[in-house]
Image (cartoon, rainbow, N blue to C red):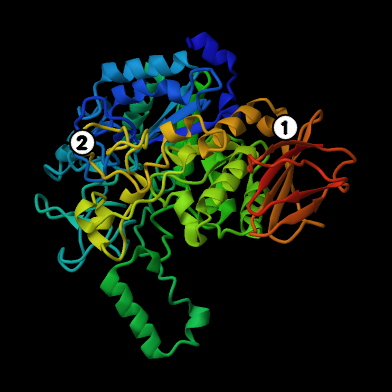
Amino acid sequence: MDLTARINKGNNWWKRAVFYQIYPRSFMDSNDDGIGDLKGIIYKLDYLNDNTPDSLGIDAIWFSPFFKSPDRDYGYDIADFCDIDSRYGTLEDFDQLLEQAHKRNIMVILDLVVNHTSIDHPWFQESRSSLDNPRREWYVWKDGKKNGKKPPNNWRNNFFGSAWSKDEVTGQYYLHSFLNEQPDLNWENPEVREAIADVIRFWLDRGVDGFRLDVAHIYCKDKQFRNNPPFYFPKKKSRGLRFTDRLMISNIMKLFSLPELQVRKYNQHQQETHNVLKGFRQIFDSYPAKTSIGEIVADDPALIATYYGQNNDELHMNFYFELLHCRFKARSFRRCIDLWEKALPDGAWPAYTLSNHDVTRVISRYDNDGQGDRKARLLLMLLLTLRGTPFIYYGEEVGMKEARLPGHDLKDPVGRKWYPLHRGRDGCRTPMQWDADKYGGFTGVEPWLPVGPDHEKYNVEMQQNNSGSLLNLTRNLIRIRKNMPALLEGRYLSQVDQIPADCFVFIRETEHQRLLIALNFSSTEKKVILKQFSNKAALIFSTNHQRQAGLTGSSILLGALEGCLLEL
């Protein structure tokens, strides 16, 4: 697809697209070294979309990082923003991937990881070399307290331990919001902003269609570097705590150094970050038909919504991650989505996902009762019928499960640090399951991570021609979505009155089309009365491929864990 064709899809193509997230290290290995690569992805593009009903039918790919990296955080510690790591291929391979994706009408967005760099990045190597190096102020350096024996303040990083590490070269501390091998860039420095702007232009000039912005809410920090307040010791409530209780909580905090035990008031969500994002948006808008989506983490949906900008002049989309933490209850999902819809400013466009490279896979997250398969079907219908852009994590379409790996197989630094209390994120990053072979068709040698559980059943080859498979359910829902204007651009209206317990019912409508989505989150049948919505309805799709009967009079009987799409 050439530039003209992409522009003809419209500047807002991303509102109508279904995205697919690929973790490149785990998607397809083309050279049998046990690691996925760019040529492997090219080889599998027809599976994603060859413009026939046999393909998955996605419209865009978000790639987790494949840039040059020492892989201490598996690609999220970048040593060169403008080069491909040799384990994945070359810039020429990327150009071929981009060309082949565009030929198939697949748009490409990259992971923009610019809160920090790798400790091996040449910028940091220069910055740490001396106090007066020209790049010293490209990172956040501070003198320690108590003659340099203590960190500058009490900030904790987002993995474990202090957010500060002392560098013996100059005796100062540098800030890192994650691993100590991931030093934070100093976004107060105009030279840093221009350098990253050049990185963005480098990839946009090469033809990419946008970016996912990693931890964008962390870019800027408090200029006074004030201590974060502890959340466990609020003044109004502390009077009810005995001294021994307060001491115990304080000692637990010191023992485990948990970042959750302080309110990160001063090292995230700073006002200056919005100015950085406005600058990014000006660059995006200077190119035709580009998009961006933010990884913004906060408990308050209204705070996340501010990252669209007051005039929709910051990010095009933002994830709302509360959907990943809902209990498997209709009211939990409805409340989450309704809160997000209410918080969004006029004209803002939401984005949703059920899984990603940092969380437990959805089919395992809710499989406490052995019904994970049926629940995954229901949630895929929810994802693909909501107002907003859906993101599908690789393997979700075949029901890949979370792997419980032994300690000696763990690669993620979080798992290696906390095992067996926490196994890290490797369980959701296992190789894509293409077939039932020993290594799942991913590679011909021992893969970098073991293949996930039950891959003999949960793989593409086994589900390809099974009309009732999760893979074909996903294909069919994507196809229906593309042909239903109300699903692409219609309003979202949550229904509460006269809805059976543990059912989530909502309307998607345009001026000329009105659809009803009814989702039964319970393990028993539920009757949904339709006459309050319309005198006439037609069943379009059910998550139960064996459903025989449609509507009974003015109602529909939903089976246990069944979802139905109706046209009113």
Rendered position, 266 above or below 508: below
Q: Residue at x 36, y 79 (%)?
A: 249
Q: Which residue is mark 2?
A: 123
Badge 2 marks a residue whose secondary structure is helix
Q: Is residue 271 above or below residue 234?
A: above
| Residue 182: mark | none
Which residue corresponds to the image point at 70% horizontal and 43% vertical from the top-left? 564
Residue under pointer 1 = 486
Q: Residue at x 57, y 45 (%)?
A: 377
Q: Please determine whether, in this image, residue 555 is positioned above or below residue 233.
A: above
Q: Quadrant of the C terminus?
A: top right
Sequence-earlier tag: 2 or 1: 2
> Which percent across, then down, holds residue 472?
55, 33
- At label 2, counting other C-alpha atoms closer than 10 Å, the crowd grade (few under 14, some 14-19, many 20 or more) is some
Q: Which callout, 2 or 1, points to the residue nearer the camera? A: 1
How far from the left and from the top, in percent, is residue 289? 53, 20
Q: Amino acid at mark 2?
A: Trp
- For residue 124, say whether it is visible: yes
Amino acid type at image mark 1: Ala
The x and y percentages for residue 339 are: 64, 53
Q: Quadrant of residue 521?
A: bottom right
Q: Is residue 173 above or below residue 470?
A: below
| Distance Cα–Cα, label 2 vs label 1 | 49 Å
Q: Residue at x 72, y 50 (%)?
A: 558
What secondary structure is found at the residue carrying circle 1? Answer: helix
Other residues around mark 1 within 10 Å, as few (<14) / some (14–19) / many (≥20): many
Q: Are marks 2 and 1 in contact (CB under 8 Å)?
A: no
In the image, taking residue 418 as reference, residue 534 lies left or right, namely right
In the rendered view, does 478 fall on the left or right side of 461?
Answer: right
Residue 39: quarter of image: top left
Apparent side of residue 183 relative to residue 286 in the rendered image (left or right): left
Looking at the image, the residue that sits furthest to the left is 169
